Image (cartoon, rainbow, N blue to C red):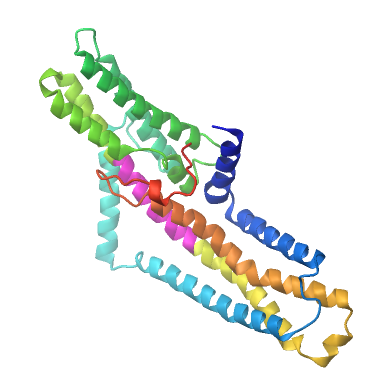
Amino acid sequence: MTDDTSWRHSVFRWTVIEGNRLTVAGVLLGGITLLLLALLVVNLFPRAPGEPLYLLFSSFLGGNLTLISVVIAINQLVFSRELGSPGDLEQRTRNAVEYRDQVQDVMDRAVSPVMPGSFLLVLHENLGKRAQALRETVTDSLDGDLSAEIDELVGALRGDVRTVTRAVDTPGADEQIFGAIAATLGTTQAEQLYDLARIETEYDAQLTDEQRELFTSIREHLLHIDVARKYFRTVYITKELSFLSRVLLIIGLPAQLFLAATLAVYDLAAIEALPAAGIVAATLVAMVACFAPLAVLASFVLRLSWVAQRNATVMPFAASEKDYTLFSTDE
């Protein structure tokens, strides 16, 4: 990876995945402020009230109101999925408990962790052990092609385990729901399930009973990992949208009040008596306030859409990301 590609890759990961959403929004607003200041320096920024600015502020005022209303409506739609009758809620809880029981049956411990990161970490650690046990079944008497196939499969499995382990071991990732999702963004369970089925079909006569049992155990681990990732994604999107709605209200309402006040006094005759520097400063602040709700929305939507894109398919199917990726995070 060249220095230019590495820099682009790091910026993309921070902007879309790793960066705090409010910090990303602040950076976007900072960039907009610098652009407006550059226009001011080259005398392309309005220095006096005028009809074009009045119409621009009016459009932003109406547009931001619509934006805030739509986001809150989407949030309420997502929350409606959490509502239900006692019977529905009981069944969902029982399904979750049943899933945990199924996972505990394949784990090397009596009780599975409750934190998302630790839960995925234990699953991957067990998967790594099964993969290592499968590699140890390869002997000199085994067919060369089969040995190569198993080595390649085990290498892919252990590579995913290392990726997830590194991601979950970072400070705070264990407790954060997004940390569990980000840890598995680059894993490829669908391809590994396909390789398992292909090897079992092509080399069925050469596989030992131990290898078949390990194949079955690995397949179960991969399915449990995918279900956990999809469930954590659902929880994350619900929590993120609720937080986005709250932030939009906290930032959007003061911005809208400032824009409304700006419009109220913009055409008053008294404004002409104000110093030119004061008018320019107020106009600059108003312009930044116009973009504040958009910057917040953009910072959250970037990560939400990325998570949805990378988790759109359901195993055992897979889809190519080449047509939908601006920059790859797996480089």
Residue 324 in picture, x, y percent from top left = 41, 51
Q: Is residue 8 left or right of residue 115?
A: right
> Which segment is the magenta one?
224-241
- Residue 5, given in percent of the width and then of the height, sits at 56, 38
Please give the name of the residue rendered at 32% of the width and 33% of the height, measured from the top-left corner: 110
* Residue 207 location, quadrant: top left
Figure label count = 0
Magenta span main SS: helix
Q: Nearer the viewer, residue 176 or 248?
A: 248
Give the percent coordinates (x, y) of residue 61: 61, 80
Return the residue found at the far bottom: 269
Say if residue 115 shows up in the picture. Answer: no
Q: Is residue 217 magenta?
A: no
**Picture residue at 29% right of the left edge, 18% below the top:** 135
Judged left or right of residue 22, residue 67 is left
Q: Position of residue 235 (x, y in %)?
A: 41, 55
Looking at the image, which is closer to me, 117 or 257? Answer: 257
- Decide if residue 43 is on the left or right side of residue 65: right
Q: Quadrant of residue 262?
A: bottom right
Task: Depth check: give the residue in front, 50 or 100.
Answer: 50
> Is 139 located above or below residue 202 in the figure?
above
Asked if the stretch drawn in magenta spans residue 238, the answer is yes
Q: Is residue 102 visible?
A: yes
| Residue depicted at x 57% and y 33% | 2
Q: Residue placed farthest to the top in the image?
A: 140
Left or right: 264, with 138 as reference point? right
Taking 284 as reference, is 139 above or below it? above
| Residue at image location 37% in from the left, 32% down from the top | 124
The extreme left residue here reads 205
If the image is split into quadrants, where does the N terminus sit? Answer: top right
